[in-house]
Image (cartoon, rainbow, N blue to C red):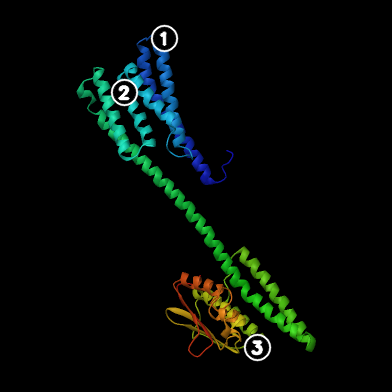
Amino acid sequence: MTGIGTAQDLDLWRGRRAARAGACVWLLPMGWPLWVFLSARPQPWAVVAVAAATAVFAASWLAIMWRMFSGHAMKPRPWALAGLVTSGPALMPVLGPPWVYLSFVFAVSAFGTALRGRAFAAACAATAALQVTVLLGQGEAAGQVWWVPIAVAAQAAAVDSLRRMGGLIARLDAARAEVGRLAVENERLRFARDLHDTLGHTLTSITIRSQLAARLAAADPGRAAQEMTEVERAARVALDEVRRAIAGYRAPSLSEELETATRNLGVAGIAVAVSPADGPVPAAAEALLAWAVREGATNVLRHSRARHCWIDLGVDATSATVEIRDDGRPAPDAANGGPAAAADRGGAGAGHGGSGLAGLAERVGGVGGRLEAGTPPGGGYRLHVRVPLGGGS
């Protein structure tokens, strides 16, 4: 079974093998008209001619079925269809009514693989007319052949239904493959977003502490060494978080994120005031609020040039909320349209509206929550997240 790499491929291969075996079994009824023909002790030349025509008919039939139950287009090769429609009628005068009654099954099935719509209906009607004409010409009574057109129509309807079902199954299989591809792509995007959210805050903290240590290296070596110790600790935390993200997604703790945000903002010289919620935040919403605190604090560190930051938590009967505000000021080159101006406008990966907020918005929107971000009338920046108590997984 070389080349069969998945369970789906194996099932498909087995299905094709079973269908082709069934096509071979369908040839067994040909023994009936051949037995009747040989029982009449025909001339040797007639036996050779019938054997040759029967071989052409069987080979053409198998070629059509093999191609139909393969990965190629369902249309049969022209020589196979021509061999079938030529050898079939040629055998009718020799093999008599048994062959006439039997051959329409093969003919209609073969037409179903090559023709569509009116062409298929016309071919089936011609097959029924030819059968009735041959049977009447061979002495069959009209009362004995009236059912032949009905049988041909029933066979045609069955073939058309099977063909439509096959097309539907093929489309469903293609849709399933597309759904699988999109699921993998969405999982990749989600993992990338989670990795960004996980590392962005920690790496920002490392950058801030490294800059502070560099400034203190000459004036206060002891403090600089302490800050570098914190940098090492933060780097180890980042490594641990990456490992946890790879092993399985880690839901952040709201209390840990508040503590980390307060510590890191304090190192950067930003005073933090945290207003707790009036009651406990349900676990269903805690993870999303923790992500919001992490992203909001990261944005304050990176872009705000603020002196104060306020983190307000809230919870009521239907939702939990967090609001992060700062008194940030635009960078000196904002008026000239420089990078800071792009940041204030939400440039990708640069300002308050960067890719981190986009990922957070996806998380919040995914559970029916709401995210608001922008500059309030009094200046600074405001991030407000509301999460329904039924979400936040």
Front one among 332 and 346 = 332
Q: Secondary structure at mark 2?
A: helix
Name the quadrant of the N terminus: top right
Quadrant of the rendered image containing residue 153: top left
In the picture shown, does residue 330 fall above or below 9?
A: below
- In this picture, residue 199 sits left or right of residue 35: right
Q: Residues within 10 Å of mark 3 (few under 14, many from 20)?
A: some
Front one among 5 and 329 = 329
Can see residue 338? yes
In the picture shown, does residue 244 fall above or below 116?
A: below
Gap between marks 3 and 1 measured at Cα: 109 Å
Gap between marks 2 and 3 measured at Cα: 97 Å
* Residue 189 horizontal/vertical position (percent): 55, 64
Amino acid carrying mark 2 in the image: Val
* Residue 25 horizontal/vertical position (percent): 43, 28
* Residue 313 horizontal/vertical position (percent): 51, 84
Say the numbered circle drawn on residue 44. 1
Quadrant of the rendered image containing residue 95: top left
Residue visible at 78% across and 89% down in the picture: 219
Q: Secondary structure at mark 3?
A: loop
Which residue is situated farthest in the left direction here? 143
Mark 3 or mark 1, which has the lower sequence index? Answer: 1
What residue would you read off at disc 3?
Answer: 269
Front one among 64 and 39 = 64
Mark 2 or mark 3, which has the lower sequence index? Answer: 2
Gap between marks 1 and 2 measured at Cα: 23 Å
Amino acid carrying mark 3 in the image: Gly
* Residue 338 horizontal/vertical position (percent): 59, 80
Say the numbered circle drawn on residue 100. 2
